[in-house]
Amino acid sequence: QVQLVQSGAEVKKPGASVKVSCKASGYTFTSYDINWVRQATGQGLEWMGWMNPNSGNTGYAQKFQGRVTMTRNTSISTAYMELSSLRSEDTAVYYCAREGRDGYNSAGFDYWGQGTLVTVSS
Amino acid sequence: QSVLTQPPSVSGAPGQRVTISCTGSSSNIGAGYDVHWYQQLPGTAPKLLIYGNSNRPSGVPDRFSGSKSGTSASLAITGLQAEDEADYYCQSYDSSLSGSNWVFGGGTKLTVL
């Protein structure tokens, strides 16, 4: 069965960086884009960007450009999201999500990781 | 504020029908981009409920249905059950001068009375 398993909770100081991992299993890792979405406590979902695990191509939301980097290691079917220059407003649960396909069309984010809480505090 | 607008809350009694609206603009839903819907139970990751405006992934009950018209979309839930109490989010693609992004609605909290 398809699974996305994320790394554990992190506590970081303002100005630091955090790198969250997302290990995929149950499907061919390079066949589906991985997206990253975050959610602050009590708030809605916020899309951060996408990565094509096959090519390594990425696309980031304008809000995060210059601060976010999405990479992958295909040998271990793992995607990574690194966010730098952290501030208190970055405190949130970060999710990775696989983007399904329906022919040439997107079929939404069909599988999600369990989420990783990143807390930014001095 | 979110690019896609949803009502903050809706409610209904068990067995009733409720709808959740998702209003966009000409740069997203109105441009022909599909709408997807997610259900998020407390403390859990979102779950895909509807994709491509009106398609249900396997395992999603047919009590859930989606539609799209013009710059808006709707999620309907019939035969409301206590387990449906959750947050619901719509999602679409937005393409404007500032770039192309996935965007979400602000979310709607469904309360089963």
Image (spheres, helix red, strand yellow):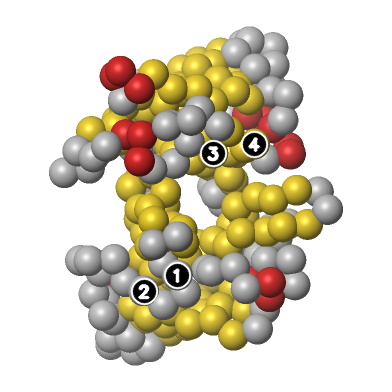
Residue at the spot of label 1? B52
What SS does tag 1 mark?
loop
Q: Chain of mark 3?
A: A
Q: Chain of mark 1?
A: B
Q: Which residue is located at x 50 percent, y 17 percent? A: A19
Neighbours of disc 4 within 10 Å: few (<14), some (14-19), many (20+): many
Q: What's the distance in space between the residues labelled 1 and 2, CA to CA?
A: 6 Å
Q: Amino acid at mark 3?
A: Trp
What SS does tag 2 mark?
loop
Q: Is residue A105 above or below residue A85?
A: below
Q: Amino acid at mark 4?
A: Tyr
Q: Are marks 1 and 4 on the same chain?
A: no
Where is residue B5, by image quadrant?
Answer: bottom right
- Marks 3,1: beta carbons within 8 A: no
Q: Is residue A56 above or below residue B11?
A: above
Q: What's the distance in space between the residues labelled 3 and 1, CA to CA?
A: 19 Å
Q: Are marks 3 and 1 on the same chain?
A: no
Where is residue A96, by image quadrant?
Answer: top left
Q: Which residue is located at x 50 percent, y 22 percent? A: A71
Q: Are marks 3 and 4 on the same chain?
A: yes
Q: What's the distance in space between the residues labelled 1 and 4, CA to CA?
A: 23 Å
Q: Are marks 1 and 2 on the same chain?
A: yes
Q: Amino acid at mark 2?
A: Asn
Residue at the spot of label 3? A50
Residue at the spot of label 4? A60
Q: What's the distance in space between the residues labelled 3 and 4, CA to CA?
A: 6 Å
